Amino acid sequence: MSDSHKKFARELEQVSSASSGVVSKDYEPIPKWTTGMEGYHYISLLGCGAVGDVFKARNVVENRFCAIKYMSFAPCNRKDIIREVKALNYLAHPNLIDMHTVSLVDKDMVLIVTPLYYSLARLLVHSVKLQRYNALTPPHMPMSEKCAGELMYQLLSGVSFMHEHGFMHRDLKSDNLMLDSYATLKIVDFGITRPFTKADLEGLGKMGTPCGTPYFMAPEIAVRLIEDNCPMYDVRAETWSCGVVLCEWLFVKPPYHMYDCDTHSYYQCMNILQYEGTADWENMYEDVPLQIKRKLSKKCVNFIENCLIGNAAKRKTVQTLMSDKWVTQYKDKKNKHVFEELLNDKVLDRLRREHEEKNTLVWYAKQVPSDGKCFVMFLFDFKGKAYNVNFYVGLMTDRRSDRSAEQTIRMQLLQLANIGVLDGRLYFIYTQKTIRLVTKYSEEHQVAAHLSEYTDHGDFATFKDHCMIVVGKNQDECLNAIKSEVPEVLPVLDDAEKEIDFKFDEKHFMKDEERFGRSSAKRDAPPRKPAPSTGKSLRERMSNRRRSASKYLDSIFGSNKLRFN
């Protein structure tokens, strides 16, 4: 390990273990974990990004479900990692994501463990699909105005807290917002968050680097992507982003989505907007969203217009908008409409099935060879039983293909982690070894292999506690290499289990703990809401139930003899 790497590891440990710098008065801290990598049971892949993958896992020691994010980085990006972890640890607020732990697990990879949340963007998608399925009159709104108001108050609260203490998120969008089981909104992904000093532009901050996501960028940021010598931007750029997010919640699409963000016309539109002192509804949307606009209250429309003023000098700050009349009415609503519309059983069931299908489709996909791919044969013994996973993966020839190959390898070996064959430590070790072997094959186009025992009492004669990885052009080339170098493994390979019976149901992973009354699923669940009152007495309700039961039995037996007295 080089001196620079040791220095980075020490600095990362310091910023991650430091106590929060500023704490909101209503913030409740989550427990910090010291569990080693072997203490995590990986279950499924939640999502992939440009620099990392996010997994659903269970901390076996703490008996809690969590999300684990792998972040790979180049040596030149170490400062960015430190900034992100420092921001996450420094700001403590109910609407900002919190961490259980962060650690350096390789020279170029950081592991961040957070609580498990629901993706707000995916909840919105399934909410709209359910409305279409139920044949409600279009146009379809992902959520009601009241639900949007409850969420917007929380979003403004989190962003305002960041601005108050000198931080800009710089990539606010629905994809970076999550919900916990209590309908609390969480702002995530602090990868490009940057601090600013209160002396900059009279406390409004000052940023120069254009970053974020098109359609969610304020005009003054978008223009900086194509023009030099533009004025600096400040925290009011995030007011625009909040307005775009609200429009997406109500109108499905963000404003100006008709313009292709990869063309000059989009940036030309943004250039014109940055001088406008009022919101431009005529160019913002086409007909259908404007039909929804007519259903909104005047206060809500005024709030959107305050956010989407193109001229940054005339745009209000998020802290000022916290006192807007439309927002303040949702301050103490306890997220009732968020529960009813986005966290109901039907939406959550669709989200769960989407998540399961995303994983199983990859695992069940037919393996198709091609010139741009290589074949991976993975053989692993666990408690005297061998498991074999075979798959094709693209050659690693550039940064984009490297990232794609990493995702494929992690996804395929996740099958063995799901059923408990690979614990968190072994899963990480062998995915990294496979990635390196594929990299080697991509460069040399010769069979690359690895064979090792992962305990101190392995036995090669029986392949006990051993792992073998072979990478070649196709399955025949891998088998020929095994026949030539280690023919003793062939009988083990023939008898190995190739059909993996993976599980996703949380009850499957928690059944032992539930038997002893220690289920984290029960602890993490929101309190059960009381049934709404009917205004009738207990005697009246019981009498109605008896009559309903009697009618039901009559319909089954075709008789009037059965009665409840």
Image: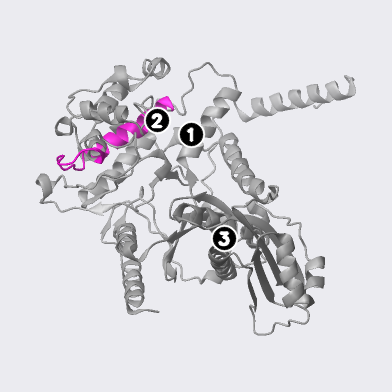
What secondary structure is marked by label 3?
A: strand
**In the rendered structure, which amino acid carries the disc numbered 2?**
Glu
Tell me the residue that label 2 is attached to. Answer: 248
Task: Indicate which disc residue 36 carries.
Answer: none
Q: CA distance from mark 3 to mark 2?
A: 33 Å
What secondary structure is marked by label 1?
A: helix
Residue 534 painted magenta:
no
Q: Nearer the viewer, residue 514 or 317?
A: 317
In the figure, is residue 332 to the left or right of 377? left
Q: Give the number of the mark in front: 3 or 2.
A: 2
Mark toward the start of the polypeptide (2 vs 1): 1
Q: Nearer the viewer, residue 356 or 147?
A: 356
Task: Indicate which disc residue 58 carries.
Answer: 3
Q: Residue at x 37, y 40 (%)?
A: 173
Q: CA distance from mark 2 to mark 1?
A: 9 Å
Tell me the residue that label 1 is attached to. Answer: 124
Q: How many marks?
A: 3
**In the rendered structure, which amino acid carries the disc numbered 3?**
Arg
Check the picture and name the quadrant holding the C terminus: top right
Quadrant in which residue 494 is drawn: bottom right
Pinpoint residue 159: horizontal percent, then vertical percent.
Answer: 29, 44
**In the rendered structure, which amino acid carries the disc numbered 1?**
Leu
Q: Residue at x 41, y 65 (%)?
A: 102
Above or below 219: residue 352: below
Do residues under tags 2 and 1 come within 8 Å of each other at their CB atoms? yes
Pinpoint residue 62: horizontal percent, then vertical percent.
Answer: 53, 65
